[in-house]
Image (cartoon, rainbow, N blue to C red):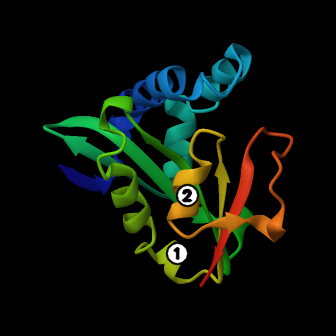
């Protein structure tokens, strides 16, 4: 198992891993239309752009991409950052891969410079992030217009 920075050549495999994960793990919490929209918003082109705007990591097992996660400045801020695109293949969930991704992101320079970190958390993953020390933003435990919970952590 290895975690490393995302490379351009990872884009297609990572997009496919995300699409599979959304269909298998998130479909119990979201409509087929929402899943389709999320897959579209995590295309290889989007992932390439995201990797240029911040730092994106992939987790590999025997050369296969099994997870990913990204961190960037929150709307260009240097004092706030945001976690994005955190996914783990269903067959690797509950094996510490998500924790490894979060720990890696929490050692990234975008995290270390930030006073506050935000995570747009899916219904599926919100409790995982809460166990990692992230709380509802402003104490608001409601889905936003994008059907995610807004979580945050202060450093």
When asked about the image quadrant of residue 99, the answer is bottom left
Q: Using the rendered view, name the quadrant where residue 88 is placed.
A: top left
The residue nearer to you, when weighing 150 against 108, is 150
Image marks 1 and 2: residues in contact by CB distance under 8 Å: no
How many angstroms separate mark 1 from mark 2 (CA)?
A: 15 Å
- The label shown at residue 95 is none
The answer to which of marks 1 and 2 sits earlier in the sequence is 1
Q: Residue at x 49, y 41 (%)?
A: 48
> Where does residue 4 sit, x and y in percent of width and height?
28, 55
Q: Residue furthest left?
A: 62
Q: Which mark is residue 129?
A: 2
Secondary element under disc 1, as helix, strand or loop, is helix
Residue at 42% over, 24% down: 16
* x then y, percent, for residue 118: 67, 64
Q: Is residue 132 left or right of residue 29?
A: left
Relative placement, left or right, of 2 versus 17 is left
Where 136 falls versus 11 (above or below)?
below
Question: Which dot marks residue 111?
Answer: 1
> Quarter of the image containing the C terminus?
bottom right
From what the image shows, is residue 120 above or below residue 10?
Answer: below
Q: Is residue 142 above or below residue 65?
A: below
Number of disc labels = 2
In front: mark 1 or mark 2? 2
Task: Tell me the crowding category of disc 2: few under 14, some 14 to 19, or many 20 or more residues within 10 angstroms, Cα based.
Answer: many
């Amino acid at each position: 198992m290895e975690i490393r920075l995302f490379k351009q050549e990872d884009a297609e495999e990572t997009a496919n891993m995300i699409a599979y994960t959304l269909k298998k793990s998130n479909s119990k919490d979201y409509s087929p239309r929402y899943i389709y929209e999320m897959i579209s918003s995590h295309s290889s082109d989007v992932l390439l752009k995201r990797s240029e705007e911040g730092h994106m990591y992939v987790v590999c097992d025997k050369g296969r991409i099994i997870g990913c996660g990204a961190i960037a400045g929150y709307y260009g801020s240097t004092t706030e950052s945001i976690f994005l695109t955190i996914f783990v293949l269903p067959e690797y969930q509950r094996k510490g891969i998500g924790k490894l991704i979060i720990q890696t992101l929490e050692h990234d320079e975008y995290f270390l410079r930030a006073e506050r970190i935000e995570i747009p958390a899916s219904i599926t993953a919100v409790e995982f992030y809460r166990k990692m020390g992230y709380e509802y933003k402003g104490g608001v435990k409601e889905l936003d217009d994008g059907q995610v919970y807004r979580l945050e952590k202060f450093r």
